[in-house]
Image: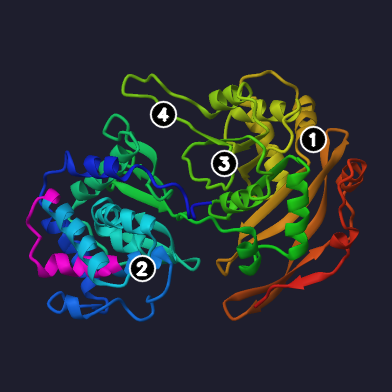
Amino acid sequence: MRDFDGTHPDSSEASDLLRSGLRRSLTADTAARLRTVAKRPVFHSVANEEQIKLEPALTGRSDYFSIKGVLQERLLKEIGERNLLGVAEQEVAGAIQEFAARILESENVPLNEAERRRLAEDLTEEIMGVGPLAPLMADPAITDILVNGPDHVYIERFGRLERTTIRFRDADHVVRVIERIAAQVGRRIDATSPMADLRLLDGSRVNATLPAVTIDGPTISIRRFGRKRLRRDQLLELGMMSAEMISFLGIAVVARTNILISGGTGAGKSTLLGALAEVIPEGERIVTIEDTAELVLDQEHLVRMETRPANIEGRGRIAARDLVINTLRMRPDRIIVGEVRGAEALDMLQAMNTGHDGSLTTIHANSPRDAISRLETMVLMAGMELPARAIREQIVSAIQILVHVRRCEDGVRRIETISEMTGMEGTTPLLQDIFSFRRRGRQGRRLRGEFTATGIVPKLVADLRDRAIDVPLELFQKRASDVGV
């Protein structure tokens, strides 16, 4: 879901952490970035900086991230022109602070006071925090950054993978960037713990590995969510769903329906989860549980919980199941599990069946029926000797709506089906599709198709009307919404 107008961490603390412990030369680090930036159009020359203002396209705009991206390009160029390639990182950090102060004083930058205060720290983090990847992090169109070694850096942009010209000096250089990211969130990665799930300060999720887990060298996989969550109306414009779908899901969330979102990796599960959570009433207490905190929610009454791996002695691990159990003692109105992937499935289902209605979660699966099978397997991982029928009855009783999302061949994430759990026939859970996406061929690279209601009025509607919640029956009339643009 990452993203994204979230709360910015304590900038002075981040800056101190960045400057304290890092005394190495920036020569190769900055040179690699400058080689990348040098291939792009030059925005300004430092020699006549005072006479030249921001690009006309940015003048008058209040888009902080666009302005910061332009300034980052100029800053990288200036670092090279001022021959700051061999100095210590503290001096480069000072040059960044001076650059930001000069720009804000001499140019009419359309930023508010809060954005002006945080500009220098954000530029410091993006220039020094992720090394040669800084230019990629400044591009909002990039959703994934994949480092397979010092010479193999790939990105996903507009749904397609492409190789970049970004290079690290060597494998040790990649490792230092990984260690820097880990230090920022209080995690560690070394030969004894060669894998780590981390996050950047902007909410992006990072997975890092070291040899000998990855035998060809260290790797970095960054899933970018950004700081702004894609909202429901934006997902509608992007063709992820139809207006009828979003209306029905909004009613279901407000009515405290338990919803399971399934889909493959990168299908948009977390993005949709954040969009659905948007309509949770402001007065409700929300507790989120995630392996790596990435959800960005609007509500003020929010408690965010994150799992923790074991330390070097093998102690201190906090699993998702521990957090789910603890959440039940925190008087939650809503429990949101970022992704269910293990034994916590049992406790989550029990919570849904014991008064904690309105819970939301996601699961990796290829279809709604696969999602049910995976939930059953995860419950067995809890070590409880439960018969299959008892587990399925728990699932059918707990989950009311299943939403399956898919990343299609054209790179667009779409809701493929919205299904209702209607009960059991023998030992088989019954599902009925309420909405679906029907393919109609292709138009160039773009997939053509339509979102359509199946014509079935869900059983849920009768329950909601008994509770005086109005659900327009027009939502379920069988008509199509063409999205093959």
Residue that numbered label 4 is attached to: 309
Name which of mark 1 and mark 2 comes first in the sequence. Answer: 2
Question: Which amino acid, by three-letter code, is at mark 1?
Answer: Val
Left or right position of 296 against 398 = left
Is there a contact, CB below 8 Å, between mark 1 and mark 3? no
Residue contact at pointers 2 and 4, CB within 8 angstroms: no
Determine the image quadrant of residue 484. Answer: bottom right
* Label 3: how many Cα within 10 Å (few below 14, some 14–19, many 20+): few
- Cα gap from disc 4 to disc 3, whole angstroms: 28 Å
For mark 2, does the 10 Å Cα neighbourhood hold few (<14), some (14 to 19), or many (20 or more) residues?
A: many
Left or right: where does residue 265 sit relative to residue 481? left
SS for dot 4: loop
Instruction: Write down the region rendered in magenta.
Output: 71-90
Specify the quadrant of the image occupied by residue 466: top right
Q: Name the residue under label 2.
A: 67
Which label's residue is closer to the chain start, 4 or 1? 4
Residue at 58% x, 55% y: name it: 268
CA gap between label 4 and label 1 equals 32 Å
- Residue kind at label 4, given as amino acid type: Pro
Residue 160 within the magenta-colored segment of the rendering: no
Q: In this view, does 281 lie above or below 95?
A: above
Disc 1 and disc 2 in contact, CB within 8 angstroms: no
* Residue behind mark 3: 300
Question: Which of the marked residues, 2 or 3, is nearer the chain's N terminus?
Answer: 2
> In the image, what residue type sits under mark 2?
Ile
